[in-house]
Image (cartoon, helix red, strand yellow):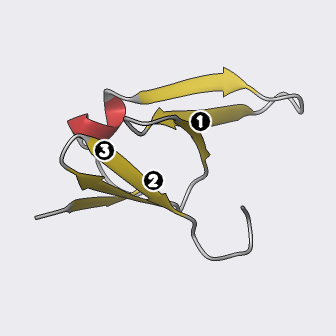
Amino acid sequence: MNEKYIFGQGEMPEWVSGRLYHYRREDGLTGYEIDTGRYMKVIFFGDKLIRNGDFIKVERRGDGRA
């Protein structure tokens, strides 16, 4: 069974926090990346993270941001 988490909502599960990295963006704000198990992916608040075994799939929040 897949586990799901909406980034930025509620308590962050360990399978997310253990793979999460933050960085300073060019605009001075904090950006976030996650190690999906295959590659690093920039994520945004509201993105859905879906754990499938050792890998994490990122689904965008649906506002057109790629």
The reply, left or right, for residue 45 in relation to residue 31 is left
Q: Which mark is residue 3?
A: none
Say what secondary structure mark 2 lies in: loop
Q: Is residue 20 visible?
A: yes
Quarter holding residue 24: top right
Quarter holding residue 16: top left
Report the Cα–Cα distance between label 2 and label 1.
Answer: 10 Å
The reply, left or right, for residue 26 in relation to residue 40 is right
The reply, left or right, for residue 16 in relation to residue 27 is left
From what the image shows, is residue 19 above or below residue 60? above
Which of discs 3 and 1 lies nearer the camera? The answer is 3
Q: Which mark is residue 55?
A: 3
Which residue is depicted at the point 40% across and 55% down? 57
Disc 3 vs disc 1: Cβ atoms closer than 8 Å?
no
Q: Which mark is residue 7?
A: 2
Q: Quadrant of the C terminus?
A: bottom right
Q: Amino acid at mark 3?
A: Phe
Q: Amino acid at mark 2?
A: Phe
Say what secondary structure mark 3 lies in: strand
Q: Nearer the viewer, residue 10 or 40?
A: 40
Q: Is residue 12 visible?
A: no
N-term mark: 2 or 3: 2
The reply, left or right, for residue 41 in relation to residue 57 is right
Identify the residue under disc 1: 32
From what the image shows, is residue 51 above or below residue 20? below
Q: Residue furthest right?
A: 27
Which residue is depicted at the point 74% across and 74% down? 64
Which residue is depicted at the point 67% across and 35% down? 31
Q: Nearer the viewer, residue 66 or 8?
A: 66
